[in-house]
Amino acid sequence: MKKNKTIVLLSGGIDSATTLFLAKKQSLTVNALVFDYGQKHKKEIRFAKQIAKIAKVKYKIVRVRMPWSRSSLTDKAKKVPENFSDKIPSTYVPGRNIIFLSYAVSFAESIKADSIFIGAHTQDYSGYPDCRKVFLENFNQAINLGIAGKAIKFRYPLINKNKKEIIQLGLKLGVPFEYTWSCYNGRKQPCLKCESCRFRVNAFKQLGLKDPLLKNKK
């Protein structure tokens, strides 16, 4: 029986890796899109490629540039923040998911895929407006008004989960978390200070586990 095709946005982190394995479990033919958008380090791209190879799915690297972005993820003059904030953090990249999903829509329509998976979830709501369910629902409606082929469905299975719940799901799916990278800094080891690191480490602790990236650290 012919499998339905889908696109998965893959960043190399816990959320997108879990989403990738979830899509695979649903017996879909998965095509991963990995984005090089001018981020200050390419470590997450290397991890994304590794995850795709482990999952045995095809992937494409898409290179885009946003020279106007003043995000601390892309601007070398800006330091990644180490404190939590109720405001939109400096790690927000303006319109990033809008751009990524637009590329994914073009790819999906070209290969006749009927869905696109994105690992957006609840802990990103306050910081990243383009991770909200209301945005994803409305953007999905908009793109289907502007394509010539069949309707494409955005799928965001982690949307109501926190990091602990995502890791629990990933463990059940067999996600090799030792090959995922979450740190906003591209050093040899996770910095353990940025917001992304702390969300990740705390989630593993809540499960009574040690982050596999830190297994050699005391």
Image: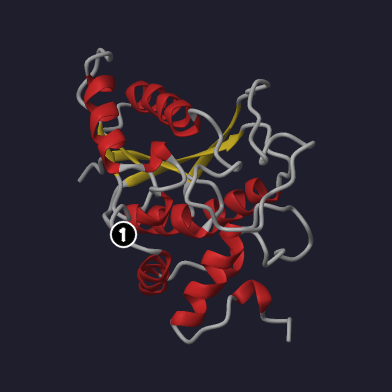
Determine the residue positioned at 45% across, 34% down.
Answer: 97
Determine the residue positioned at 22% across, 15% down.
Answer: 145
Residue 66 position in % (x across, y down): 63, 23
209 or 172: nearer the eye?
209
Is residue 180 visible from the viewing direction of this image?
no
Where residue 118 sits, quadrant-wise, is top left
Residue 189, above or below 51: below
Determine which residue is flagged by label 1. Answer: 25
Q: SS of the residue at dot 1?
A: helix
Determine the residue positioned at 41% across, 24% down.
Answer: 102
Determine the residue positioned at 27% across, 15% down.
Answer: 147
Placement of the C terminus among the 4 image quadrants: bottom right
Q: In the visual, does 163 lie left or right of 61?
A: left
For label 1, count other residues whose C-alpha is less than 10 Å away and answer few (under 14), some (14-19) or many (20+). few
Residue 81 position in % (x across, y down): 66, 51
Name the outermost residue toward the front.
86
Residue 24 position in % (x across, y down): 35, 55
Is residue 57 visible from the viewing direction of this image?
yes
195 or 7: nearer the eye?
195
Residue type for callout 1? Lys
